[in-house]
Amino acid sequence: TTITDEARIALDTLSGRAAGLFSAPSVRLGVTGLSRAGKTVFISALVHNLVHGGRLPLFEAQKSGRIARAVLEHQPDDAVPRFQYEDHIAALVKDRIWPDSTRAISELRLTIEYESASAWNRMFSAGKLSVDIVDYPGEWLLDLPLLGKSFADFSREAFEMAELPVRADLSREWRALAAEAAPDADADEMTARRLAESFSAYLKACKADERALSTLPPGRFLMPGDLDGSPALTFAPLQNLTGERPRAGSLAAMMERRYEAYKTHVVKPFFRDHIARLDRQIVLIDALQALNAGPAAMADLERSVTEILACFRPGRGNVLTDLFSRRIDRILVAATKADHLHHESHDRLQAIVRRLADRAIARANFSGAAVDVVAMAAVRATREGTVKQGKETLPVIIGTPLAGETIDGETFDGKTETAIFPGDLPEDINAVFEQPELASKPAAMDAPVRFVRFRPPKLERTAEGVTLSLPHIRLDRALQFLIGDRLA
Ligand code: GDP
């Protein structure tokens, strides 16, 4: 990190504050999580509910009728793609299909016009708050530790991870190719490309693997954004580096230069221009998928939450992290898709997330921002009911499974509503966190959660013919924590 980064962030912060004196106050809300965690669905549902006056009883400003209206406005950053809200809502509401997931950074400004709760605030506040929502892949966030690592460190760690038994089979091809590449050989573009492609294929295979392996950097190898194929992404770790300066013109020198370019031109600007300016952050996690895959996957999820929280920790000696993490004062860790469970299990899911976040906070040695957790569904695709089975009455969830989903040998057509007994989460949440070595499934969860993916719901209409906003579970609680205090 250079002094220029520091100066630029300080200047940006100052000019941002100065601009804030003349325009409506704003809050920058970061939305992140690994791919498929639910970022796109969360932002779409949040905006739709605010713009269309959704049912948000736990969002105080809305409940007390102090919100006059919420409208989309021109975003402040012209160089950042706009979050395609209208397309995503058309998919969700009109076609009842899930929208395209996050592939890169995007932004959306939502301005809320409100009346302050206290007479004092009413005198001094503008009665307007702009929420700048910044959607970005969690994979990119996990690049932060690279800033402190040399190419030799990065290479060594990459091979250590790749040789671990859980990854050895997935990384075999790349390691075989890398074993042939002598660091001191003459630099050659084709060799660099083959190595980069093979390394990137291995990282993607880890991601796709059902063992839910944790995400490894570099993040753009998984989510290239607009950098696909650029030289800054055409590098890979090398074996047998001597630790000395590589010979000019060698493969090692070329790879090292590109690795440094990746840090300078990709990682640093991303943190400086985007992460350093955030005020609030929500981290979405797919806890249900991990729960279903067993304790090893839970341990892995905990590891990735630890890594993500560590990125928001005021770091010692790292100017970039020092500067940006001081600004973020609230972080919400949210398990979304709770509509796959009956409401009796929602509190258990939340307790599991709390335990996971507490342990991640302790492990990441995190402090400096208020951290809360929630189990929610940004879009509730199911309703609840009961089914009689013999003498027993079973709680079920009812929804339209996506075409092609199967359960108990039955394949769905995407049109038929079906009741599914989803299973319960264990009352004793310790069972979920058992040592991964001991069992592949937690003992208390002999019937794991049964999963089918549902279509997005039909919007309800009231008796007066008013169409309601997208249904959700506890989205209002998330909103209250993230921006409620700014509307007081
Ligand atoms: P992203 O990669 O983080 O942007 O993930 P998305 O928002 O695209 O979500 C990935 C998938 O998870 C969606 O296509 C849905 O199938 C599912 N999903 C996300 N949020 C919800 C939710 O609140 N309820 C349900 N039932 N499914 C969800």
Image (cartoon, helix red, strand yellow):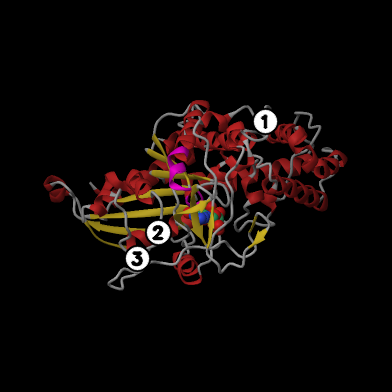
Extreme residue toward the bottom, this view:
465
Q: Mark 2: which amino acid?
A: Pro
Q: Nearer the viewer, mark 2 or mark 1?
A: 1
Q: Secondary structure at mark 1?
A: loop
Q: Mark 1: which amino acid?
A: Ala
Query: In the image, which disc is placed on residue 439?
Result: 1
Question: Marks 3 and 2, Cα distance to the nearest angstrom?
Answer: 8 Å
Nearer to us in this view, 195 or 186: 195
225 relative to 293, above or below: below
Q: Secondary structure at mark 2?
A: loop
Which residue is drawn at the image coordinates 50% and 30% (left, top)?
428
Residue 435 pos. (x, y %): 63, 27
- Label 2 sits on residue: 471
The mark nearer the N terminus, 1 or 3, is 1
Asked whether the residues under the numbered discs 3 and 2 touch, taking CB atoms below 8 Å apart as contact, a structural biologist would say yes
Residue 443: say if magenta. Answer: no
